[in-house]
Image (cartoon, rainbow, N blue to C red):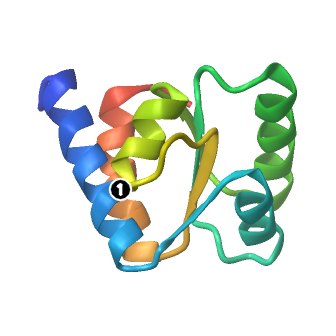
Amino acid sequence: MLNEAVAKKRMMSLLGLAAKAGYVASGEFSTEKSVKEGKSYVVIVAEDASENTKKMFRNMCTFYQVPIYFICEKTELGHAIGKEFRASLSINNEGMAKSIEKYLNQECSK
């Protein structure tokens, strides 16, 4: 099992690759749209997102049966995908989502 720092670093690298490949929808509106259209395989929400944002995505992901994780800060999440900051993002590719989820399961619990 990888230590948490290595797992987080690899997961952030995978997020960057997913973004470059066009598999990431970021920002509240785009993330919500991906989930509702059934395109999302994993949703990641920043730990420092507002409680309303967390609750909305938690409820939505439960309803649409999409795994959801709460990790890092908005700036870290945004930086990983080449943006300034992001409160939420969706991985819209099954293979990439499974790879990222492997590290997310080591990094944090749902």
Q: Is residue 17 left or right of residue 49?
A: left
Front residue (pair 50, 85): 85
Residue beneath the point at 13% across and 23% down: 3
Task: Say if residue 1 shows up in the picture.
Answer: no
Picture residue at 12% right of the left edge, 31% below the top: 2
Q: Is residue 32 visible?
A: yes
Image coordinates for residue 1, horizontal then vertical, percent: 12, 31
> Compared with residue 17, is residue 68 higher up or lower down, i.e. above or below?
above
From the viewer's side, name the closer residue of 101 and 52.
Answer: 52
Please, is residue 90 above or below residue 18 in the view? above
What residue type is disc 1 on? Leu
Where is residue 28 shown, x and y percent of the image?
A: 75, 51
Q: Along the line of sight, which residue is nearer the eye, 78 or 2?
A: 78
Q: Quadrant of residue 65?
A: bottom right
| Residue carrying label 1 | 15
- Counting from the top left corner in percent of width and height, residue 79 is at 38, 43
Which residue is pictured at 38% across the width and 37% down the height? 105
Q: Position of residue 99 (x, y in %)?
A: 30, 60
Q: Is residue 95 left or right of residue 52?
A: left
**Viewport quadrant of the C terminus:** top right
Instruction: Classify residue 57 as left or right of residue 66.
Output: right
Number of numbered discs overlaid on the protein picture: 1
SS at circle 1: helix
50 in relation to 105, above or below:
above
Image quadrant where residue 40 sits? bottom right
Badge 1, how many Cα within 10 Å: few under 14, some, many 20+? Answer: many
Q: Residue at x 53, y 40 (%)?
A: 85
- Give whichever of 86, 88 is nearer the camera: 86
